[in-house]
């Protein structure tokens, strides 16, 4: 790939990385307890959490995979921000975030034990841990693809370098280091990607010529994807039919992600007050409205300039290497690394919290003090990163799947069932522990069965028609897994004795009147 980095690019990149490491290590020097490590001592301001929420959500999978999907399918990718984030964040801000903050919990599985049982907590903890660990692999693999294209280095070397870089300050500084570095990373990420938008639009002559060129490409392909359409029909061959976007994304995957994902909720739990926890989600939702400019528009610019790329995931690396001048390439790579680091550090810390609090302390050392939890948290952070490296190397063996689709399919396995039992527990007093466990496992199994039956070799072997005709039908997986989990939760709960009143008194949501 032409357009290698120059000395100025390396200087920009080195200055950014050195600043991140210094900030992360400086914040981590004062940690003394497990609460400091996992919740920053509950001293985080709303504005820092708001930036961190956005930086955590917009990771390497979005910069590379989301931009790749915009290149393949067009503007419909922006629905993952406008429909898939903002409404759920506002609901979370005024209902679930203050509710969890009042309870004083440290993890989502901890809430599940308070509301249901230790079995539900452990089951969810293991599933979330597996999800976050493999998700780390997807993120690291995405970073390796970008760095390999820009540096010309071996993909494995790039993966190991990025993992080592993020692992150092995350294992040292905990959540506080994650959040405060995320603030700077968010600014760099947005600034770097907006630079490529500005240069790309200048190259094309503006927004109007960009869309004219995209329409011209669509017309020349006759019957292909309409890249300028925000809402696509239900029978589209893309992963974004309006039915999947509305029912699967906005009603299921998005709420599950923003109110049930440990990496997201953990930030608000570290806020200084209930008010600041709410304000952080509102601030993040406001910022989310401009995020499509960060990776969707560059995907369209890449389509207009380079319409014949073999792999859509190469769209943004191609722009960076061919379009940007010396100096700007270093800024863009810093923006990409900011996206990578802000998400990876979040998942490392959150996976470590689940390992330490929901598994180690809950089952192995219930009497562990805060100093021991701090040591175990740092140790498990290293272990989680090692697992992420292994799954990232394995991801490189999978051909034909965009990294964004791989991430979303992985999320669909647990997000639908998680939302069902979370809503059932928080809003319905009659929900029982047995109903939650059966519902969660049944919903997750549904996703696995649907995914298996939708693979062509399985269909050919069984002589069945495809279950879904859209590409990467993870949105439909989430719909059915949620419905099955909710049905099982309600049915089994109605057939089993209700939970004691003292268990549901505080763990079921009620609107505060004063």
Image (cartoon, rainbow, N blue to C red):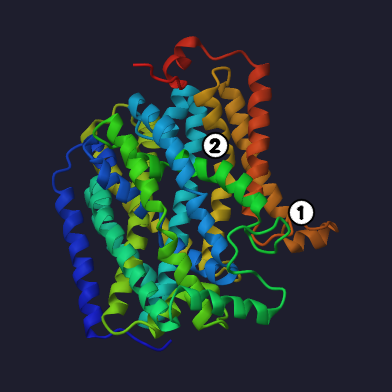
Residue 262 at what x, y percent from top left?
41, 41
Q: Which of 234 and 477 is in front in this view?
A: 234
User: In what element is the residue under mark 1?
Assistant: loop
Tell whether 378 sits left or right of 260.
left
Of the image marks 1 and 2, the number of the one nearer the N terminus: 2
**Residue reaching furthest to the right:** 463
Q: Quadrant of the C terminus?
A: top left
Q: Residue placed at 55% from the left, 55% from the top?
A: 408
- Count residues near mark 1 (Cα–Cα under 10 Å), then give few for <14, some for 14-19, many for 20+: few
Q: Which of 125 and 27 is in front in this view?
A: 27
In the rendered view, would you say 420 is above or below 317?
Answer: above
Residue positioned 61% across, 13% down in the render: 497
Give the secondary structure at mark 2. helix
Q: Residue tagged by mark 2?
A: 419
Residue at the spot 20% in from the left edge and 61% down from the top edge? 21
Image mark for residue 371: none
Residue 96: quarter of image: top left
**x, y (%) of residue 214?**
56, 76
Image side of residue 446 versus residue 78, left or right: right
Q: Are marks 1 and 2 in contact (CB under 8 Å)?
A: no
Q: Where in the figure is residue 16, as x and y percent of width and height?
A: 22, 68
Q: How crowded is mark 2: few (under 14 residues within 10 Å), some or many (20 or more)?
A: many
Residue 161 seen from this side = no
Instruction: Quickly name the residue at label 1.
Output: 467
| Residue at the farthest bottom position | 2
**Residue 174's spot in the image, x, y percent?**
26, 47
């Amino acid at each position: 790939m032409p357009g290698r980095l120059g000395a100025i690019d390396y200087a920009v990149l080195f200055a950014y990385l050195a600043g991140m490491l210094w900030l992360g290590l400086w914040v981590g020097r004062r940690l003394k307890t497990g609460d400091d490590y996992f919740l920053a001592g509950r001293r985080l301001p709303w504005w820092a959490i708001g930036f961190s929420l956005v930086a955590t959500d917009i990771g390497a999978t979005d910069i590379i995979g989301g931009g790749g999907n915009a290149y393949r399918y067009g503007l419909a990718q922006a629905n993952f921000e406008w429909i898939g984030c903002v409404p759920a964040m506002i609901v979370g801000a005024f209902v679930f975030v203050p509710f969890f903050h009042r309870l004083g919990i440290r993890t989502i599985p901890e809430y599940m034990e308070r509301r249901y049982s230790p079995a539900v907590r452990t089951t969810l903890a293991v599933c979330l841990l597996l999800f976050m660990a493999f998700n780390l692999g997807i993120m690291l693999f995405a970073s390796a693809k970008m760095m390999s294209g820009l540096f010309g280095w071996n993909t494995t070397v790039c993966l190991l370098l990025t993992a080592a870089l993020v692992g150092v300050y995350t294992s040292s500084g905990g959540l506080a280091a994650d959040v405060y570095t995320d603030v700077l990373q968010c600014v760099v990420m947005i600034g770097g990607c907006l630079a490529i938008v500005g240069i790309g639009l200048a190259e094309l002559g503006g927004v109007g010529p960009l869309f004219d060129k995209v329409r011209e490409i669509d017309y020349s392909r006759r019957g292909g994807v309409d890249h300028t359409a925000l809402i696509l029909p239900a029978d589209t061959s893309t992963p974004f039919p309006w039915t999947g976007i509305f029912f699967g994304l906005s009603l299921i995957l998005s709420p599950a992600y923003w109110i049930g994902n440990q990496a997201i909720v953990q930030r608000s739990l570290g806020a200084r007050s209930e008010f600041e926890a709410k304000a952080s989600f509102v601030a993040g939702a406001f910022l989310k409205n401009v995020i499509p400019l960060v990776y969707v528009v560059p995907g369209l610019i890449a389509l207009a300039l380079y319409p014949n790329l073999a792999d859509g995931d190469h769209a943004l690396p191609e722009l960076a290497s061919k379009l940007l001048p010396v100096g700007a390439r270093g800024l863009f790579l810093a923006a990409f690394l900011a996206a990578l680091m802000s998400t990876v550090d979040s998942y490392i810390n959150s996976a470590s919290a689940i390992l330490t609090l929901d598994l180690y302390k809950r089952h192995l050392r219930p009497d562990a003090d805060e100093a021991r939890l701090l040591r175990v948290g740092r140790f498990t952070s290293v272990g989680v990163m090692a697992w992420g490296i292994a799954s990232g190397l394995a991801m490189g063996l999978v051909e034909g799947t965009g990294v964004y689709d791989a991430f979303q399919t992985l999320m669909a396995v647990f997000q639908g069932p998680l939302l069902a039992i979370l809503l059932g527990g928080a809003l319905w007093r009659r929900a029982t522990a047995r109903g939650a466990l059966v519902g969660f496992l049944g919903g997750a199994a549904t996703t696995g069965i649907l995914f298996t039956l939708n693979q062509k070799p399985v269909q050919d072997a069984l002589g069945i028609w495809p279950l879904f005709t859209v590409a990467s039908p993870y949105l439909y997986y989430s719909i059915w897994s949620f419905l099955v989990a909710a049905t099982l939760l309600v049915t089994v709960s109605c057939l089993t004795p209700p939970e004691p009143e003292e268990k549901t008194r505080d763990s079921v949501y009620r609107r505060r009147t004063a």
